Image: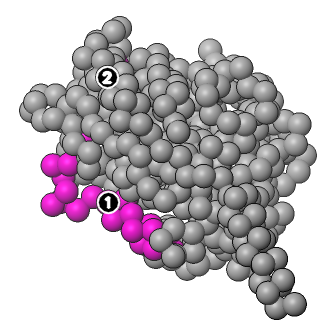
Amino acid sequence: MQRTLFCVVVLLLVNIEAAQPASPSLAPSGAAAISRFLGDVVARGDVPGIVAIVVAPDKVLYHEAFGRMNVAQNAPMTKDAIFRIASMTKAVTSVGVMQLVEQGKVGLDDDASKYIPRLKAPQVLTKVDAAAGTYETRPASGPITIRRLLTHMSGIGYSWSDPGLAVAQKKTGATNDSELPLVNDPGAQWTYGASTRVLGDVIEKVSGERIDAYLEAHVLGPLGMRDTTYTVPKGKYARVVTINQKANGKITETQNPDPLPATIRGDGGLFSTAADYSRFVRMILNKGELDGVRILRESTVAEMSQNQIGTVRVRLQPTADALRTKPYPLGAGEDQWGFGFQIAAPQSPSRSMRSPGSMSWAGLNNTFYWIDPHKQVGAVILMQMLPFYDDGAIQALQGFEERVYQNLK
């Protein structure tokens, strides 16, 4: 009887092990193909420099650097180069919020005005006269909730992206986009904006810690992301990539100031490396845990990774500043949104290779990541050039993605 029970247990364990997706690998020829492609992107002058990394849940599959991190100084790009990752900060902040949700300190359907009183009775843009520089508003039909902030369904936008908000920003002089009128009623449609900045404010209110201190103590530090900070120590300045601007086919470089300014907020401002951010990616691939350190419950990661906006779809965002961004994102009209991540639609013609349900987002200076739980792979590709969604940068992203999947084993 005992022997039979032992055999049953062994068979169950074997079946459970077999049910786990195998950790992928990348053939040397595949790594060479990726390097040839990214090397050609830089050699053509599409972007000055790139760092790219590919990871499985348990290991790094690829990590290389191309081009220059400082063109004027002829400094080669290095694998540990530090980039401004801008809105890639949003996923990190969203994880911080979900930790507070797990602890019962924040409710997903709480009215955000419970924590940030200025959000009570929000107003929605109804009429904009760009020529006259005027606009009209009406009361919103519903509240801004934590859930709506996590999914960009709050109606809060960005003045650099939405022409109507650009008018409102100019008229009011507001420097915080979350203080401008809403683009649409909360819950009505997906609008990319400063929702995660508000979530950073919520973290500060609930935890009693500034957002940088909270994320360092509860996310970045535990994950070993030692180069991911809002404030770069002076000893690391030489590793920070310069900012570049493409206009009329020409790229102009701006040298880094000294000291490097810090922008400390929930929706942007972090500096990071490809290796550091890949640890965050691996934590999500490992369902909330990395190297024995648990950041989130497995059920929380599953919730963050699922469509949370019903039949609504991510919609193409306009631009009010062509030097800053082109219309974005890929997947508009098809993809959905979870808690902090864009979710690849089941049928998505704009996707080259990544699986349905893959998570992703980006940063303003053309930094990108994606997380593919089905294929058990994640990737980060970092550039440092405006405008966001520059054709050359998007071709680099898509060509990189294509060669990753073509060569996975």
Can residue 287 be seen by looking at this rendering? yes
Residue 100 shown left or right of residue 24 in the figure: right
Residue ID for mark 2: 36
At 49% across and 31% down in the image, what residue appears? Answer: 407
Quarter holding residue 253: top left
| Mark number, residue 180 | none
Label 2 sits on a secondary structure element that is helix
Quarter holding residue 224: bottom left
Residue 168 shown left or right of residue 4 in the figure: left
Distance Cα–Cα, label 1 vs label 2: 28 Å
- The amino acid type, in three-letter code, at marker 2 is Arg
The image shows residue 67, relative to residue 198, as above or below, that is: above
Q: Label 1: how many residues lie within 10 Å, few (<14), some (14-19) or many (20+)?
A: many
Q: Does the magenta-highlighted stretch encompass residue 231?
A: yes
Which of disc 2 and disc 1 is earlier in sequence? 2
| Mark number, residue 227 | 1
Can residue 154 be seen by looking at this rendering? no
Q: Label 2: how many residues lie within 10 Å, few (<14), some (14-19) or many (20+)?
A: few
Rendered location of residue 86, percent (x, y):
45, 45
Q: Which residues are magenta?
A: 218-246
Rendered location of residue 316, percent (x, y):
68, 24
Label 1 sits on a secondary structure element that is loop
Quarter holding residue 365: top left
Depth check, mark 1 against mark 2: the one in front is 2
At 20% across and 48% down in the image, what residue appears? Answer: 239
> In the picture, which quadrant includes the N terminus?
bottom right
Rendered location of residue 250, percent (x, y):
28, 12
The image shows residue 381, relative to residue 297, as above or below, that is: above
Q: Nearer the viewer, residue 173 or 350?
A: 350
Q: Which colouring convention does the figure follow?
A: one colour
Q: Does the magenta-highlighted stretch encompass residue 107?
A: no
